């Protein structure tokens, strides 16, 4: 009979170390409490929520003519929009390692189309956009941009997040048709209303309501992929309803199955820029005003979005966003890329919050979103299937979640109460992140100075207050001169 040896001490087996993949290690997926599946879902969700820009940007830029009467074709701008969004969003994932997607900025593309282009050629307008990107990149590389962001008091940063939450929700409600403008708003005390004539009617609104209620239920039950599932279900319902009843009133995108899936891209606008010609065509003063507007809007719109979405993703430590310097650098490159490709300044999109709400925490989600934008170069017809009514519920729900940051605002401190309120209110009410940030900063600095607390303001915030004062008054001053 064989005896067991007992001369060695008994030891419990050592735990097998968890093997971290190269992708996990590079993007810090496990470290940030996420998974590969969540990142992919988040990336897809962000793309679905913002792919409308591939259709909307060509409509905006194509609606205007330059000083020579030239128009941009839909195919040209569609290619430029998808190309710039794909490149810059992938770059954000690889360099910034943040779940932030970039595309042609709404608002600034209107400045390019309706203010800049009529005074110069398209090449000159895109040249000014490239110069804007150069300015923002220089501020990012020098560290000035990050210092400005870090100088803003924490309560105002929280207010930016809350204001953007309201902004996101309002954008969702308006794009879906749940909230509409009053026809005689100029002569009415009520500028907006619910639905049409104060009533919710029509299949598009019904699809939005179904998608919103489904998303609320799935999120409350912590169902994985709740946002994406809701968008896909609402899209399928919209396609079925539209094919049966031939519905009107969907807005920009009607949920029709495309006849052709593949489309050929048109790269004719790529690199077609004139850096300094706009100063001669529009005049030096006018061109400088355009450039100032682009830089200021791009700077602070992105700052607000980056701060608020990063806070929702848990990437803010001690009031600072992790990897902010790299994120700001990529954002500046985005503005440059928008001009170079013939699109509009690319900036971080609020819809990134939809992907964060789906669980995205790293740059892998951005790589997924960017890859889908790149694929859109060849599959543009598929992007035209998802109507606003299917994607808008994500904006409403995520916007509501961002409102939870209100609890961290020191409302009892009167030095912050009014500036915080102005920031929160003016971002959605004026449809501009820059306006809200500017009003809040000016009010905060004014209160501090009037109370004799100039040293607590600091020179950097003082300069910002002067810059924003000039920003608000610039149209009046230039017209006076």
Image (cartoon, grey):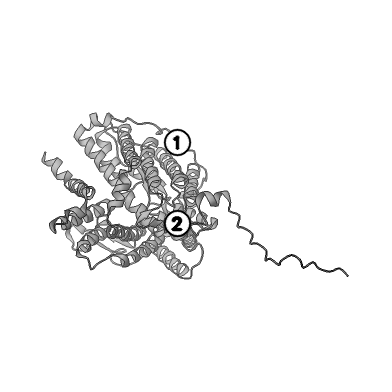
- In the picture shown, does residue 189 fall above or below 436? below
Between 17 and 89, the one lying in front of the other is 17
Q: Callout 2: helix, strand or loop?
A: helix
Q: Give the residue at x 49% y 48%.
A: 367
Q: Residue furthest right?
A: 1
Residue that label 1 marks: 266
Between 192 and 128, the one lying in front of the other is 128
For marks 2 and 1, give the CA distance: 29 Å
- In the picture shown, does residue 381 fall above or below 154? above
User: Seen in the image, is 427 located left or right of residue 253?
Assistant: left
User: Seen in the image, is 19 located left or right of residue 179?
Assistant: right
Q: Position of residue 54 (x, y in %)?
A: 41, 46
In the rendered image, the quadrant that contains the C terminus is top left
User: Seen in the image, is 462 located left or right of residue 351?
Assistant: left
Q: Which circle marks residue 83 in the picture?
A: none
Q: Residue furthest left?
A: 480
Res. 205 image quadrant? bottom left
Residue that label 2 marks: 355
Mark 2 or 1: in front is 2
Question: How many C-alpha atoms fall within 10 Å of the one at disc 1: few (<14), some, or many (≥20)?
Answer: some
Callout count: 2
Q: Position of residue 386 (x, y in %)?
A: 45, 54
Q: Position of residue 305 (x, y in %)?
A: 35, 53
């Amino acid at each position: 009979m064989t005896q067991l040896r007992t001369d060695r001490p008994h030891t419990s087996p050592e735990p097998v170390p968890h093997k971290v993949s190269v992708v996990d290690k590079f993007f810090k997926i496990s470290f940030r409490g996420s998974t590969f599946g969540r990142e992919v879902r988040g990336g897809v969700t962000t793309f679905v929520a913002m792919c409308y820009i591939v259709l909307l940007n060509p409509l905006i830029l194509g609606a205007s003519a330059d000083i020579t009467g030239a128009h941009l074709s839909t195919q040209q701008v569609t290619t430029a929009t998808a190309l710039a969004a794909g490149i810059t969003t992938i770059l954000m994932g690889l360099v910034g390692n943040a779940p932030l997607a970039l595309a042609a900025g709404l608002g600034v593309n209107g400045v390019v189309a309706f203010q800049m282009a009529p005074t110069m050629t398209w090449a000159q307008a895109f040249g000014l956009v490239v110069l804007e990107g150069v300015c923002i990149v220089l501020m990012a590389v020098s560290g000035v941009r990050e210092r400005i962001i870090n100088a803003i008091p924490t309560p105002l940063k929280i207010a930016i997040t809350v204001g953007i939450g309201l902004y996101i929700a309002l954008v969702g409600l308006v794009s879906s048709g749940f909230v509409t403008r009053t026809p005689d708003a100029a002569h009415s005390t009520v500028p907006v209303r619910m639905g049409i004539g104060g009533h919710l009617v029509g299949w598009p609104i019904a699809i939005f309501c179904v998608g919103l209620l489904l998303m609320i239920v799935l999120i409350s039950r912590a169902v994985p992929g709740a946002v994406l599932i809701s968008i896909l279900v609402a899209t399928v319902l919209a396609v079925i309803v539209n094919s049966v009843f031939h519905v009107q009133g969907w807005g920009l995108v009607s949920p029709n199955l495309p006849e052709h899936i593949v489309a050929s891209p048109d790269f004719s606008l790529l690199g077609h820029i004139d850096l300094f010609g706009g100063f001669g065509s529009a005049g030096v003063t006018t061109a400088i005003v355009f450039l100032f507007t682009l830089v200021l809007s791009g700077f602070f719109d992105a700052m607000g979005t980056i701060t608020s979405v990063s806070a929702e993703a848990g990437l803010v430590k001690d009031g600072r966003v992790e990897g902010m310097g790299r994120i700001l650098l990529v954002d500046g490159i985005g503005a440059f890329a928008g001009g170079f490709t013939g699109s509009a300044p690319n900036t971080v999109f609020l819809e990134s919050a939809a992907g964060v709400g789906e669980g995205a925490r790293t740059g892998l989600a951005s790589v997924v979103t960017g890859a889908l934008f790149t694929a859109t170069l060849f599959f543009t017809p598929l992007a035209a299937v998802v109507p606003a009514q299917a994607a808008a519920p994500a904006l409403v729900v995520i916007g509501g979640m961002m409102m939870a940051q209100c609890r961290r605002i020191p409302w009892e401190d009167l030095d912050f109460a009014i500036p915080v309120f102005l920031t929160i209110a003016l971002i959605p009410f004026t449809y501009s992140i820059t306006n809200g940030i500017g009003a809040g900063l000016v009010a905060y600095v004014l209160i501090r100075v009037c109370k004799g607390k100039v040293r607590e303001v600091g020179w950097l915030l003082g300069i910002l207050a002067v810059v924003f004062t000039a920003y608000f008054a610039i149209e009046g001053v230039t017209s006076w001169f």
